[in-house]
Amino acid sequence: MPEFDHSTLAFIDDDYDERHGHSRFGLYLDENAAGLDDSDFRISGAEFAALVWTVATAPTMSPGYVRIRPDLLAITANPAEDDPADLVLRITAPLPHRVLNTRPGKGRWLDWEKDCHRCGPWSAKVEPIPGRQPVLTLTADILLPIPAEELTVPATPLARTGLTRAAKRTVARLAGHINRIGGPAVAALLGDVS
């Protein structure tokens, strides 16, 4: 199974997906991709990519077909607002206080904490419980645009096997793009704090 590192933010877990002789991802697609088997249904490449990415990741699929590095808050996919034929991948990362030039006041402000239930080099970050101290949590959103011409527009209707194959190819391309472009950006932003 692939491992996370400084520039690997997402990977495909085919071994787990096919463990029982069928694709769990394919079953989740059947449940969540209504309309793709209708010959009158039309979907853009961005809509298809956003749909299959959402199905492939937690919380829709848990554990996800696409595994997201636990120290990140989310990686989402949506059609672009200015041109819905394009796709935008959003990587949301928690930032430590040390990235600030100044703090918002005197005293100790609580920061993101590591999730003690899942410790490790890429531990999930959780908001601290304020108690009697103020809390300041920072996040950064990295937006990765993908133009329409780089996306696959699936032919409809899609039979289950065709849908699963097209969806797997699409999420693999998205994960590769995230790691190739977003991985170094997140590594530079977070340094060795993860």
Image: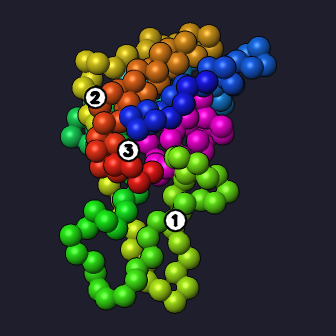
Earlier sequence position, callout 2 versus callout 3 = 3
Where residue 180 sits, quadrant-wise, is top left
Residue 115 lies within the magenta run: no
Is residue 127 at all visible to an observer of this figure? yes
| 108 w.r.t. 19: above or below | below
Q: Name the residue located 46 percent from the left edge and 21 percent from the top edge.
A: 172
Q: What is the count of numbered marks?
A: 3
Is residue 92 at all visible to an observer of this figure? no
> Who is closer to the viewer here, 176 or 119?
119
Image mark for residue 91: 3
Label 3 SS: strand
Choose mark 3 or mark 1, whichever is in front: 1
Q: Name the residue located 63 percent from the left edge and 60 percent from the top edge.
A: 116
Q: Amino acid at mark 1?
A: Glu
Choose mark 2 or mark 3, whichever is in front: 3
Give the main secondary structure of the magenta stretch.
Answer: loop
Q: Amino acid at mark 2?
A: Ile
Q: Which residue is mark 1?
A: 113
Label 1 SS: strand
Image mark for residue 69: none
Work out how far the residue at label 2 is from the one at label 3, CA to CA, in angstroms: 14 Å
Earlier sequence position, callout 1 versus callout 2 = 1
Left/right placement of residue 169 relative to residue 117 reads left
> Tag 1: Cα neighbours inside 10 Å, few (<14), some, or many (≥20)?
some
Q: Amino acid at mark 3?
A: Ile
The span picked out in magenta is 57-76
Q: Which residue is mark 2?
A: 146
